[in-house]
Image (cartoon, rainbow, N blue to C red):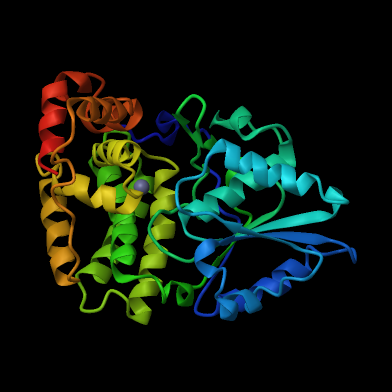
Amino acid sequence: MITDIRAAGVNNVRNVSHYIFGENSLDNLPSLLADRRKGLGDSIIFLVDEFFKDKNKILDRLHITNKDQLIIVDTGKEPTTTYINEIYSGLVNIDDPSRLVGVVGIGGGITLDTAKAVSNLLGNGGMAEDYQGWDLLTSPGLYKIGIPTISGTGSEATRTCVMTNAKNGLKLGMNSEYTIYDQLVLDPELTKTVPRSQYFYTGMDAYIHCTESLSGSYRNTIGDALSSQSLNLCRQVFLGNDMLSDRNRANLMVASYLGGCAIASSYVGVVHPFSAGLSVVLGLHHGVANCIALAALGEFYGTAKEELLTMAQAQDIDIPHGVCANLSEDQYDQLYKSTVVHEKPLTNALGPEYRNLLTRDKVYKIFSTM
Ligand code: ZN
C-alpha cells in the first residue's frame, strides 16, 4: 500500500479556503459579493443551473444587479470546450471586461464545473482546450464562489472541471489548483427540490468514489479518513428512513464535500471507467450510470454492490436494468474502448497489468449483464 500522497500525482494538496455551511447560508451571498464590488460599475457573473431559471424565490435571494451578467447554464449534456469558449467570448466582449470581479456558480456538477472553467479562462485568456490536462494554468482564475444544489459529485471540492473537446473526443478537465473554488456556500435547503431518483443516483456518486478509493492501491491516510467518513454519512442517509429529511440532506452535502476532498489525493477504480463507457456510448447521466455499473461489478466490489441494492430498496429507487440489451457489435466495441482507456483508475484497482484481466471478452460480458 502506498501511503504517500505524492504517488497520486499531487505534490501539495490545496483545499477550498473558505466555506459557509448551514441551512439558509445562501443568504450570506450578497455580503460575500459586497466585499468584491469595490467600484460602482463592478460586475459579478452568475452562472445559474437551468433548473433555477424560473425559480424566482431562489433567484431573488442572489441579489443580481443590472450591472451583473446572468448566464443560464445548459445542463442537458456535459460541458464542451466549445460551450465554455462561447460563454467566455460573450463576457470579454462586454463594454469593460475589467469590471468583472467575480464568478458565482450555482447548481449541480455541470454548472459548478462550467463556472470553474469560465473563471479560469477569465484569469488566463486563450481557449478552454489549451488547459485540458494537468497544471497547465499559469494564473489564478477570477475569484469564484461555488454553491451546490445537489449532493454527490464532489465538484465543489475538486481541482478539476470536466469537459469534452468535441473535435478530438478528449474528455479531460483543467486539472489545477487554480480550479479550486475560493469560497463555497453549502446550504442544504437548496437540495430540497431535487427529484428523489436524481437525489439518490447523484448522492451515490460520493459513496462510489469513496468505495473505489478505499479499495485501490494509491492510498494515503488523509484520503482514507475523508473517504471513510463520507461513506459513514452516505450510510446514515441511504439506510435511514427518509433520505430527504433535513438532517440527511445536510449529511449528504457534507458527504459530497468530503468525498470531493478525498478524490484530490486518490483515484477511483473499476466502476467509474465502466460508468464512463455507458455515458459516452449510451449518453447515460453520470450518477445513474455509476449505479448500473456497480450493480454489475459485484465480482470486484461484492459488499458495496449488496449495500447499493439494500439502499435502493430502502429508498424505493429502481436501478435500471437491460440498458445493454440489443446493442450492436460496434457499440460493444465502443463500450470496451471507452472503458479500458482509463488507465490510472484501473491500475489503482487492478494493477498495471489490468488489460490481462479486463479482456475484450470479459468487458463485453460485464456490459451484457447491465
Ligand atoms: Zn463520479
Among the 4 quarters of the image, the one containing residue 242: bottom left
Q: State the residue at coordinates (33%, 61%).
A: 203
Residue 176 location, x and y as percent? 57, 37
- Drawn side of residue 318 relative to residue 152, left or right: left
Residue 148 visible at all:
no
Give the residue furthest to the right.
Answer: 40
Above or below — where is 189 with respect to 183?
A: below
Among the 4 quarters of the image, the one containing residue 70: bottom right
Q: State the residue at coordinates (37%, 61%).
A: 255
Residue 169 visible at all:
yes
Residue 356 location, x and y as percent? 16, 18
Q: How many circles with numbers are drawn on the protein? A: 0
Closer-to-camera residue (246/295):
295
Above or below — where is 106 with respect to 26?
A: above
Closer-to-camera residue (207/85):
85
Q: State the residue at coordinates (57%, 68%).
A: 53
Quadrant in the picture for the C terminus: top left
